[in-house]
Amino acid sequence: MISPYKNTFRVSQAYRHLRSDGTYHQGYDLVGIGDKHIYSPVYGTVIRAGWECATLPKKGFGQRVVLRVGCTNYYMYFGHLSQINVAAGQKLKPGDLIGVEGSTGHSTGSHLHWEIRINDIKTGYVSVYHYAGIPNMPGSAAYTSNWAAEIFGPGNLKKPTSGYPQRLYNSALQGALGINQDGVFGANTEKAVKEFQTAHGLTADGIVGTQTKAALSKLF
Ligand SMILES: [Zn+2]
């Protein structure tokens, strides 16, 4: 699974939970167990960092960070932070510190609201669950993501793939390879994968499986 926590966390509200006002919860609410630091799970650029509304600290996401994933049209939202460690325009790689979980904005207890949207618009919600693979069930179960291997997603990456959530996994791969992060696994990505595999003594088949992921994860 992929998560913005490096240590143990739990789910306090599920993606698509139907709220009392009739609207759906469009992200996960996650709570760090002990360690409250929030890290970027992607190669991306900080689009916004700070208060959603500085004069209304109880509004919306409160202190939030919005990241654009590579050069894709996908945006990650990290809401209710107590502390922000990044600034707009900053480029992040997986594992870079974004901030600290908190309860700013419309919130009743310390948690992270983590959401993914396409095109950075309010109707652009996509399933963070299908990207992250964290069980979509609130409760006390404690999870830990394996940062090194899992940011490239659960399966093999190979040509030709795009669509969601593969586009985000491909973007992580392209970020690690240092090539254009459009999230589309096309001929250029396949070529870069084969070169990487050759340089690292792996079978140059252009398919990103367990061994290639392990070698790539040493790059960040
Ligand atoms: Zn939430």
Image (tube, rainbow, N blue to C red):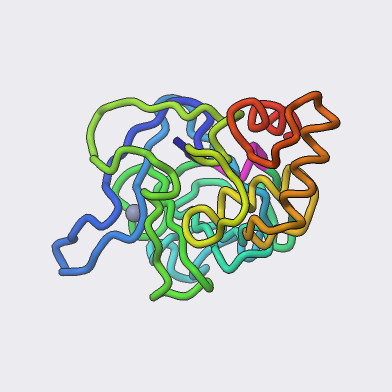
Residue 197 picture location, percent across and down: 77, 33
Count of marks placed on residues:
0
Q: Is residue 155 magenta?
A: no
State the residue in front, 97 or 199. 199
Identify the residue shown where x is 43% and y is 44%.
Answer: 132
Quarter of the image for residue 162 reads bottom right
Where does residue 171 sit, x and y in percent of width and height? 64, 53
Residue closest to the eye, 206 or 196:
206
Q: Is residue 114 left or right of residue 17?
A: right
The magenta segment is 94-100
Name the residue located 62 percent from the left edge and 62 percent from the top edge.
Answer: 68
- Check the image and name the residue furthest to the right: 199
Image point 34% across, 47% down: which residue?
A: 29
Q: In percent of the image, x 46 and y 55: which residue is there? A: 79
Residue 49 x, y percent position in the rendering:
61, 60
Is residue 191 depicted above or below 89 in this figure? above
